[in-house]
Image (spheres, rainbow, N blue to C red):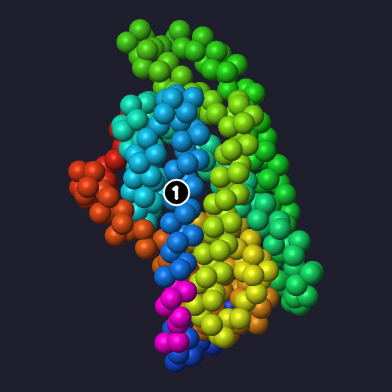
């Protein structure tokens, strides 16, 4: 997957290599922003954090009858703030906070985090597949190089999607048998370590317990759909804020979201997130947007979807009694 992602991002960057950049045009595109649409885009963005908290509540319900939505929402906002500030090291802040506040094992919430990532990846692949399917109806002209990149991207999405489905089915049907085998295999450990490791294994299995319930699994899937619907609406509002400079229909925004969803899972050393590169390439190559406008839009999209949460998350962290130093060390505790 990483090798294919590297190939995809490298090919897309080559698309932009020979293009010159007019900084005055980029500045002009920002000077005419419709700030009201930028403000409106924050509403669906806020909805995505609410949706994530509701989805995590489904993961938590097999362990706790009535999880606190307030605790889950606060942990979600603080967790994504930590990711923005500290990178991937901040991923475990949210599971750690939820485990502490809801008085459940950290290992169970790490499992819930893995389960969330499985559904996020599955939805990213579905949205990307939808984007590929809509290319013909949108009457877009593809260069031979970009067509080759999309062909490989489609193959990657198919293989990855099958792997994700297999993983999800494994969590649903094999977690309990695996738990029994691992527990029985712990007899070789010294006596003082057995209880701790057994609790960790039990917590990991409990974290994916919600996948064994059909209603819960359906609810998680619906929350995942809602999240991506809100993301598409947020992108559309951002496109509207650029006015005539972009002129993207909702169908084109949907296509863009599909490519960005797939590019967002690619994080490579020396290249970074593939989402920004793919945003620029899709806008310039598929929709004929000028490079400067496309770049300005990609920067604003990144700022809105990643940076806006930071002041809110820091305020919530202060209210929860968490300091900057505490956030940096959260998630380093043993399972």
Instruction: Please give the residue where the numbered disc 1 appears in the rendered image.
Output: 50
For label 1, the SS is helix
Q: How many labels does the image show?
A: 1
Q: Is residue 303 visible?
A: yes
Residue in the picture at 55% in, 13% down: 180
For this orientation, the residue located farthest to the bottom is 24
For residue 120, above or below residue 111: below
Q: Main secondary structure of the magenta part?
A: helix
Give how far across and how far down residue 174 sits, in percent. 62, 22
- Which of the 4 quarters of the picture holds residue 179? top right
In the rendered view of the protein, which quadrant contains the C terminus?
top left
For the magenta stretch, what is the residue range? Answer: 31-38
Q: Which residue is drawn at 54% across and 59% down?
A: 231
The residue drawn where x is 42% and y is 87% is 31
The spot of residue 234 in percent (x, y) is: 52, 64
Residue 8 against residue 226 in the figure, above or below: below
Q: Can you see residue 3? A: no
Foreground residue among 262 and 212: 212
Residue name at image x 46 percent, y 80 percent: 34
Q: Position of residue 236 (x, y in %)?
A: 56, 69
* 125 with respect to 296 (left or right): right
Q: Where is residue 20 in the image (x, y as percent from the top left)?
A: 54, 87
Q: How crowded is mark 1: few (under 14 residues within 10 Å), some or many (20 or more)?
A: many
- Answer left or right for 47 relative to 105: right
The answer to whether residue 144 is magenta is no
Q: Nearer the viewer, residue 186 or 170?
A: 170
Q: Is residue 78 left or right of residue 240?
A: left
């Amino acid at each position: 997957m990483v090798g294919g992602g590297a190939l995809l991002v490298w090919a897309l960057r080559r698309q932009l290599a020979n293009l010159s950049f007019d900084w005055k045009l980029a500045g002009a595109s920002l000077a005419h922003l419709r700030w009201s649409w930028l403000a409106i885009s924050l509403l669906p963005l806020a909805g995505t954090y609410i949706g994530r908290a509701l989805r995590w509540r489904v993961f938590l319900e097999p362990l706790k009858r009535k999880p606190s939505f307030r605790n889950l929402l606060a942990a979600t906002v603080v967790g994504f703030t930590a990711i923005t500030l500290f990178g991937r090291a901040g991923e475990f802040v949210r599971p750690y906070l939820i485990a502490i506040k809801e008085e459940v094992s950290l290992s169970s919430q790490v499992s819930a985090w893995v389960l969330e990532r499985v559904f996020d990846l599955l939805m990213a692949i579905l949205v990307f597949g939808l984007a590929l399917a809509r290319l013909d109806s949108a009457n877009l002209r593809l260069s031979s190089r970009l067509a080759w990149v999309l062909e490989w991207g489609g193959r990657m999405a198919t293989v990855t999607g099958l792997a994700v489905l297999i993983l999800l089915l494994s969590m649903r049907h094999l977690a309990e048998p695996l738990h029994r085998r691992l527990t029985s295999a712990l007899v070789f450990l010294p006596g003082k370590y057995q209880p701790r490791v057994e609790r960790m294994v039990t917590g990991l299995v409990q974290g994916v317990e919600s996948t064994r319930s059909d209603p819960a699994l359906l609810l998680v899937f619906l929350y995942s759909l809602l999240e991506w619907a809100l993301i598409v609406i947020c992108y559309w509002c951002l496109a509207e804020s650029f006015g005539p400079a972009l002129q993207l229909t909702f169908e084109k925004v949907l296509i863009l979201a599909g490519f960005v969803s797939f590019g967002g899972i690619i994080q490579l050393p020396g290249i970074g997130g593939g989402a920004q590169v793919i945003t620029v390439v899709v806008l310039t190559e598929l929709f004929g947007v000028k490079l400067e406008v496309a770049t300005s839009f990609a920067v604003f999209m990144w700022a809105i979807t990643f940076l806006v949460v930071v002041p809110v998350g820091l305020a919530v962290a202060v209210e929860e009694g968490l300091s900057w130093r505490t956030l940096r060390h959260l998630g380093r505790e043993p399972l």
